[in-house]
Image: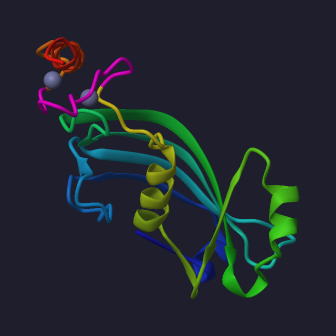
């Protein structure tokens, strides 16, 4: 869905769309959309700006990635409001301007004559994902010695390494 400046100049555009898994390219082979992405809201051209577009609304979806610690699937569900601002590339402010103005809102830039909803959502979703993607808060990860998943099996690798050292000492 494309929001063209010419259309936004006339009126706000309301949207209520569903993207099935695969319709939005998440640009990460480890990241999968596992439920329909529902996005509804309104696109508007802000007055007294040089073509700033605001997308405001609510989104709902679930994604699946790979746990950073144990490599098992890690799920992420989103059901949240968004409020995104897009400025035309030609009026890109300096970094300092951005830092001053950004605050709570998210500012991106667009090229050409409008904003593509799919791209805006992709960018936003990637920001919503935590830096460290884990299957659960207390995931114990993989044992570096035996490669066993510590969530399922409790190996005694460290203990054994220690025992071996004592054994080596005893042999002296
Ligand atoms: Zn994990
Ligand atoms: Zn182990």
Q: Quadrant of the N terminus?
A: bottom left
| Residue 140 horizontal side relative to residue 127, left or right | left
**Could you say which quadrant of the image residue 96 lies in?**
bottom right
Q: Nearer the viewer, residue 55 or 170?
A: 170
Q: Tell me the residue at 42%/48% (across/down).
A: 39
Q: Quadrant of residue 138?
A: top left
| Residue farthest toward the front in the current orientation of the protein | 172
Describe residue 74's horizontal placement relative to residue 111 as left or right. left
Q: Position of residue 52 (x, y in %)?
A: 73, 71
Q: Is 151 contained in the magenta span?
A: no
Task: Indicate the quadrant of ligand 2 in the picture.
Answer: top left
Q: Which x, y percent locates residue 121? A: 45, 57
Residue at (19, 36) in percent of width and height: 73
User: Residue 44: image x %, image y %?
Assistant: 65, 63
Residue 3 image offset from top left, x and y in percent: 52, 72
In the foreground, 71 or 31: 71
Task: Say how many tags the image has.
Answer: 0
First to last magenta residue range = 136-148
């Amino acid at each position: 869905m494309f929001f063209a400046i010419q259309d936004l100049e006339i009126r706000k555009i309301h949207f209520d769309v569903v993207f099935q898994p695969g319709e939005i390219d998440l640009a990460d082979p480890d990241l999968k959309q596992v439920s329909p992405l529902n996005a509804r809201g309104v696109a508007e051209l802000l007055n007294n700006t040089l073509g700033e577009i605001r997308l405001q609304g609510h989104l709902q979806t679930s994604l699946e990635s790979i746990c950073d610690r144990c490599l098992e699937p890690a799920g992420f569900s989103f059901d949240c409001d968004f409020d995104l601002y897009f400025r035309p590339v030609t009026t890109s402010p300096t970094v300092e301007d951005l830092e001053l103005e950004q605050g709570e809102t998210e500012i991106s830039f667009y090229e050409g004559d409008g904003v593509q909803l799919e791209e805006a959502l992709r960018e936003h979703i990637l920001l919503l994902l935590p830096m460290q993607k884990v299957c659960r808060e207390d995931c114990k990860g993989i044992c570096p010695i035996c490669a066993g998943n510590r969530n399922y099996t409790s190996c005694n690798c460290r203990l054994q390494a220690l025992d071996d050292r004592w054994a080596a000492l005893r042999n002296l």
